Structure formats: structure tokens, C-alpha cells
Image (cartoon, rainbow, N blue to C red):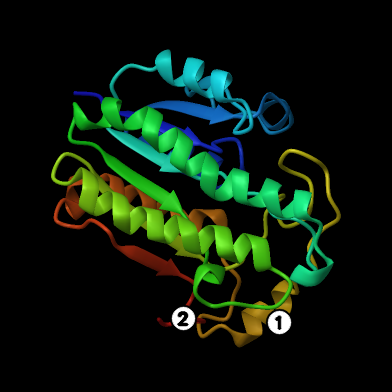
């Protein structure tokens, strides 16, 4: 029997990689993302598309309403403001980052839970190593992703045994997101030195979107059927909580 998967932020680099993997495994995949992003980064052939905006409650509700019951939900939505100290970050920038990375996760999860409970489904949130391994100039993003991990654990308790909820927390990945070319608005590339990251990482390279795919698909599958409320840290050994 074919399983159904909804991927929020599915037009991003991680989302596209997960979509390809899920399609290979014969999942029925629906990508939920901004029209702007989907137009810029077309989703893999075979996936359905629903336009969504995490600042538009009606659009979110209508997109979810059009879905049938689903077996899995991957929250890969992500957005960050330019790197700078919290003191120099405008309140509107902070609000935007929190909305996309955390409040949007609350909103979409609330809408999708009834469709997941029917099928004993699984949720996988894409968090970040910055959620626990704090670094300067990422304040709003780090706080939002830390909140997402807390949401993951709380939901795991609240919706068990009907739905499993876990998270994957990768280190920095060389994507359009980092280079300023994806998301709600085009921004300057973040000041991330991937050569230095590779040198400081035990596995001697930076992460790729494909490195996140295996952990995500594992958490969606029956191979992890006794796991909930957990975080898989995908960082080449650079951070070991």
C-alpha cells in the first residue's frame, strides 16, 4: 500500500533531496512551499505541489484541507536573517525568523495531526545543530530551532501512541539557503566558511542535503517504530551532545 508524505519547505535543498528519496521508495509526496520558491527550484517529477505561506493562515488551512490522510510529515521549512548580534537585529527580522521556523511548525502540525493520527503517522522536524551548539550572530535562528526541538519532545508525549515525533539536527549545509538565494526574500549570503568547517569536522567535509536524507527516511519508516521524542544530530562528529 502506497504511503503519503507531506513535506513543508519541500522546494528547498533538503526538501528536494527528501522528496527524491521518498519517490524512489514509492511514497505519494506532496510538496508544500512558497510559489516563488517552487517556481525558482522546481520539485522533482512525480511530486504534487500545494502552494503555502506560513504568514497566511487561510492558505495553510486550504492547502492542508486538500490533502487526504497522510502517513508522514517532514517539516523542512527554514529561514534566517543576516548574521549579526541580537542587539543589532531589528524586531521585525526576529519575528520573521521565529514565524517561519517555529510558529509555522506549530500551525502546520496542528492542522496535520488529525490526518496523521488516522494512519499512525510520523513527524520529522528539521532542526539545527545551532539549537544546542550556540554560536554568535545566529540568535533568532538558534532560538527558533531550539524551540522546535522542545516542540518535538512535547508533541511526542502528547500525541503518543498515535503519532511518532522526532527531529534531525544537521550542521551547516552548503545550500541556496546559506547562499541567500532561497526563501521569502533574496538576502546576502551568510558568512559561512565551509572549508574551515570541513577542516574542523572529524569526517573532514561539510554536510550535503543528501546526508540528511537517510536519517529522515529512517525516522519516517517502521525501522524507527520504537523511537519518539528523539533528535538525530547529523554533523560529521563536529558536535556530540
Quarter of image, res 224: bottom left
Label 2 Cα crowd, 10 Å radius (few <14 / some 14-19 / many 20+): few
| Residue 70, placed above or below residue 232 | above
* x then y, percent, for residue 106: 45, 42
| Quadrant housing the N terminus | top left
**Left or right of residue 208, residue 82 in this image:** right
Q: Is residue 62 above or below residue 148?
A: above
Q: Residues within 10 Å of mark 1 (few under 14, many from 20)?
A: few
State the residue position of label 2.
Answer: 237
Residue 121: name its quadrant: top left
Left or right relative to 137: residue 161: left
Residue 43 pos. (x, y %)? 58, 29
Q: Is residue 197 left or right of residue 213?
A: right
Q: For the point 54% across and 78% down, which residue is it?
A: 133
Q: Earlier in the sequence, mark 1 or mark 2?
A: 1
**Mark on residue 26?**
none
Which secondary structure, mark 2? Answer: loop
Is any atom of residue 57 visible in this view? Answer: yes
Residue 143: percent from left, percent from top = 57, 64
Of 19 and 52, the residue lying toward us: 52
How many numbered discs, if any? 2
In the image, 214 versus 51, the foreground residue is 51
Disc 1 secondary structure class = helix
Decide: is 234 above or below 45: below
Q: Is residue 188 left or right of residue 214?
A: right
Q: Disc 1, disc 2: CB below 8 Å? A: no
State the separation of the CA atoms marked 1 and 2. Answer: 14 Å
**Residue 196: which disc?**
1
Measuring from the top left, give residue 204's x and y in whole percent: 57, 81
Amino acid at each position: 500500500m502506497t504511503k503519503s508524505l507531506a513535506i513543508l519547505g519541500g522546494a528547498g535543498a533538503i526538501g528536494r533531496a527528501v522528496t527524491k528519496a521518498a519517490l524512489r521508495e514509492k511514497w505519494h509526496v506532496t510538496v508544500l512551499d512558497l510559489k516563488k520558491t517552487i517556481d525558482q527550484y522546481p520539485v522533482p517529477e512525480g511530486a504534487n505541489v500545494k502552494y503555502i505561506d506560513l504568514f497566511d493562515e487561510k492558505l495553510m488551512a486550504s492547502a492542508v484541507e486538500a490533502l487526504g490522510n497522510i502517513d508522514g510529515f517532514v517539516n523542512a521549512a527554514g529561514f534566517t536573517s543576516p548574521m549579526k548580534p541580537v542587539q543589532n537585529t531589528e524586531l521585525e527580522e526576529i519575528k520573521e525568523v521565529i514565524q517561519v521556523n517555529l510558529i509555522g511548525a506549530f500551525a502546520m502540525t496542528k492542522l496535520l495531526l488529525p490526518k496523521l493520527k488516522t494512519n499512525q503517522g510520523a513527524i520529522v522536524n528539521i532542526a539545527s545543530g545551532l539549537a544546542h551548539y550556540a554560536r554568535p550572530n545566529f540568535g533568532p535562528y538558534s532560538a527558533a530551532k531550539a524551540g522546535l526541538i522542545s516542540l518535538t519532545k512535547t508533541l511526542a508525549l502528547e500525541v503518543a501512541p498515535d503519532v511518532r515525533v522526532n527531529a534531525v539536527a544537521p550542521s551547516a549545509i552548503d545550500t541556496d539557503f546559506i547562499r541567500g538565494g532561497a526563501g521569502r526574500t533574496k538576502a546576502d549570503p551568510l558568512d559561512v566558511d565551509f572549508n574551515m568547517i570541513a577542516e574542523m569536522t572529524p569526517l573532514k567535509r561539510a554536510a550535503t542535503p543528501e546526508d540528511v536524507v537517510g536519517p529522515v527516511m529512517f525516522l519516517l519508516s517502521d525501522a524507527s517504530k520504537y523511537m519518539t521524542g528523539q533528535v538525530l544530530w547529523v554533523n560529521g562528529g563536529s558536535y556530540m551532545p
